[in-house]
Image (cartoon, rainbow, N blue to C red):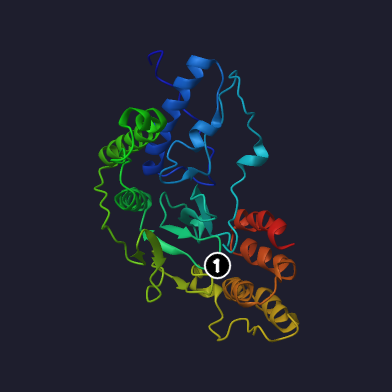
Amino acid sequence: MTESTPPPWVDDLFPFPTPPALRTLIDVAWQAAYDFYRENESFDHTLLESHYDFMFDLEATPRPLAGWDAYPEVDDQDRRLRVPHFATPEFVPFGSLGDGGSVGWLVPAPELGRLDHPVVLASGHDHGVTQIGPDTRAGLEFMLSRALRRWREDPDPEPPAWRDRDVWLAQNQWRIDSRAKDRGLVDRLAAELGVHPDPELTSPGSRWSGTAVQQDSEFDIVLDVPEGWRHEPGADGVGVLAPADAYNDREPVVYFSSWESSLEPALATAEHLLDTGYPASALLGLKDVFVNAETSCFADLKPLWARAYRDLGRPGHAERLDLMTPMYG
């Protein structure tokens, strides 16, 4: 390892190993942050977070290594992976879009120990997710394509004909340099990931509206279902993936109408399903209630919701419900 080669970063960013495609992005940003550290004798984690701000800010970044001075200081509380507004714990974000939205993975059954996951967008403004790739590499190709599409609509800045060119350049050279740097990053990532971003690229589950990505309402999330398991779609756009014997095969699973004045019937049904060994059915119904209720009922749902996750062997998802509490009470 040469002096300019950074030490390896510690992969403790997510509840599972960082998929190789995202590791590639983090490696590049880690090198830039290390170069800054060598020059300034201080580690700045915000440089890592914003390295790809033309696509997204990284939700999770490596912590400074032992013995490194860091400013701003890294707070472990800030490293907790949030659950975006209107999302459910199965959504694990790796990038913040800056408008309330996030890009991340669907991890419906972490106990399967899969090394990669489908990539989706969560708007942060309403329920549901938009699939943009079956895995991290494809999802990043889509995000690179999204950047190219936005740049096509907002071309590289040039001096207006009526402005003095030298004066304009003195005021705007930073914009030109920034766009050139970002384009260079797109080219580098495309080469290292082996992808071919294109502003016209589409992905099953999404469609373009100008430069905005919209959900294809006729498309259901596609998950890899192991033998003996089932995936049941749900109102949150994710549904439940679980062993077939964790469902009771009754419809509706947990009935709730927005005009009902009481949650008690729904909660009683969910508790009965849990008591009789059908946590997948209970989970599906509880998440449907969370989406369909007109007012926030999160505090009432949370105890049974957490129990459903634990009964399915998903304690990490149960803990992620705690991150939702400040948003819903």
Question: At 40% across and 16% down in the image, what residue appears?
Answer: 4
Residue found at the very far top of the displayed protein: 3
Q: Amino acid at mark 1?
A: Asp
- Graded by Cα atoms within 10 Å as few (under 14), some (14 to 19) or many (20 or more), the crowding at tag 1 reads few
- Locate residue 296, reporting x and y percent: 70, 70
Question: At 51% across and 51% down in the image, what residue appears?
Answer: 93
Q: Secondary structure at mark 1?
A: loop
The C terminus - image quarter = bottom right
- Locate residue 178, reporting x and y percent: 38, 34
Q: Is 285 placed above or below 23 here? A: below
Q: Is 283 placed above or below 85 here? A: below
The one of 226 and 31 positioned closer to us in this rendering? 31
Q: Is 82 placed above or below 232 here? A: above
Task: Kindly identify which residue carries mark 1.
Answer: 126
The one of 131 and 252 positioned closer to us in this rendering? 131
Residue 19 visible: yes
The N terminus - image quarter = top left
Residue 223 visible: no
Q: Is 295 placed above or below 133 here? A: below
- Dividing the picture into quarters, in which one does residue 254 lie? bottom right
How many numbered discs, if any? 1
The one of 282 and 156 positioned closer to us in this rendering? 156
- Locate residue 260, reporting x and y percent: 71, 86
- Locate residue 200, reporting x and y percent: 26, 58
